[in-house]
Image (cartoon, rainbow, N blue to C red):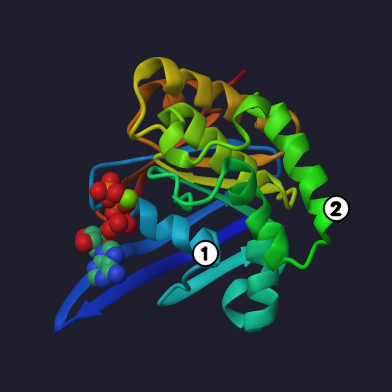
């Protein structure tokens, strides 16, 4: 479903040129659980932005479900970001003044889903993620693990086939972090393709495949037999 062919990404800021990705090639099949690891600055987030159609490669090709992403119209790109891909970030990116429920509902409002339907769906995912007694809490009234679960609930509402997470356990203590890892495993088992950028050895150990980036290049791509 994901094909990355010789992708490079070059940033230019005030005459300083940074090659964040240099000739990255790999494929991901539907249903895989992939951990992306590597030192700080190795290009992990840059790669994730490209995979999530938030950014385009400087050269090379990114093909998602048989479409070359850089050739798609802005409308089609927005549609893919909304329907196909769920994003989860280290810092949750929740809106601070809104309740858990409102945070989860918001992307569905943007997608034009009716009020009754979006509330119903939000309640379903929040319940599935064990948050039904926290729906009225604002983010600062939740633990880190609960915040991240709200963020995951938000990512799930449009039923994306791909989940992309950038250090989702980076701000969490071990126990809450384990809870989030188990949740990703469960979501993967229910058929979603999961790619997680991580410094967490536990995630890397539980993923079926670990891709290691160094200096914008894949230096290792290991699949485990399960
Ligand atoms: N918008 C930008 N403009 C210029 N340079 C950038 C930009 N974004 C990233 N870079 C550079 O590209 C390289 C890769 O950055 P990236 O954020 O992908 O690394 P990373 O592997 O996610 O690191 P970390 O583990 O610290 O999050 C770094 O050298 C970074 O400074
Ligand atoms: Mg990063």
Considering depth in this image, is 78 or 47 the residue closer to the camera?
A: 78
> Does mark 1's beta carbon lie closer than 8 Å to ligand 1?
no
Q: Position of residue 26 (x, y in %)?
A: 52, 52
User: Is residue 72 something that shows in the picture?
Assistant: no
Report the side of 149 relative to 57 (left or right): right
Residue depicted at 68% across the width and 34% down the height? 126
Q: Split into 4 quadrants, where in the image is the C terminus?
A: top right
Considering depth in this image, is 13 or 207 the residue closer to the camera?
A: 13
Q: Is residue 123 above or below residue 49?
A: above
Residue depicted at 75% across the width and 48% down the height? 159
For the residue labelled by badge 1, is the local secondary structure a helix, a strand or a loop?
A: strand
Ligand 1's quadrant is: bottom left
Considering depth in this image, is 75 or 157 the residue closer to the camera?
A: 157
Q: Label 2: how many residues lie within 10 Å, few (<14), some (14-19) or many (20+)?
A: few
Considering depth in this image, is 73 or 70 the residue closer to the camera?
A: 73
Q: Position of residue 23 (x, y in %)?
A: 38, 63
User: CA separation, marks 1 and 2?
Assistant: 43 Å
Where does label 1 land, which residue? 5
| N-terminal label among 1 and 2 | 1
User: Is residue 32 something that shows in the picture?
Assistant: yes
- Proximity of marks 1 and 2: CB atoms separated by less than 8 Å: no
Q: Is residue 198 above or below residue 186?
A: below
Numbered circle sitting on residue 225: none
Residue depicted at 24% across the width and 42% down the height? 39
Q: Label 1: how many residues lie within 10 Å, few (<14), some (14-19) or many (20+)?
A: some
Q: Name the quadrant containing residue 17.
A: bottom left
Where does label 2 land, which residue? 116
Q: Position of residue 93 (x, y in %)?
A: 44, 51
Q: Name the quadrant containing residue 183.
A: top right
Tally of marks: 2
């Amino acid at each position: 479903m994901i094909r990355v062919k010789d992708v490079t990404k070059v940033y230019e800021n005030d005459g300083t040129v940074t090659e964040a990705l240099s000739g990255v090639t790999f494929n991901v099949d539907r249903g895989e659980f992939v951990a992306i690891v590597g030192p700080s600055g190795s290009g992990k987030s840059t790669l994730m932005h490209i995979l999530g159609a938030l950014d385009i490669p400087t050269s090379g090709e990114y093909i998602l479900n048989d479409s070359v992403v850089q050739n798609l119209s802005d409308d089609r790109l927005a549609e893919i970001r909304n329907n196909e891909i769920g994003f989860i970030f280290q810092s949750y990116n929740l809106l601070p003044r809104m309740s858990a429920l409102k945070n989860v509902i918001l992307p569905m409002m943007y997608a034009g889903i009716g009020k009754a339907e979006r509330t119903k769906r939000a309640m379903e995912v929040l319940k599935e993620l064990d948050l039904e007694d926290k729906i009225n809490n604002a983010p600062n009234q939740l633990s880190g693990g609960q915040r991240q679960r709200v963020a995951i609930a938000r990512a799930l509402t449009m039923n994306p086939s791909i989940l992309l997470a950038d250090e989702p356990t980076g701000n969490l203590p071990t126990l809450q972090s384990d809870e989030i890892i188990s949740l990703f495993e469960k979501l993967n088992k229910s058929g979603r393709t999961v790619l997680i950028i991580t410094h967490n050895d536990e995630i890397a150990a539980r993923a079926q495949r670990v891709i290691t980036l160094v200096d914008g290049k894949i230096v290792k791509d290991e699949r485990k037999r399960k």
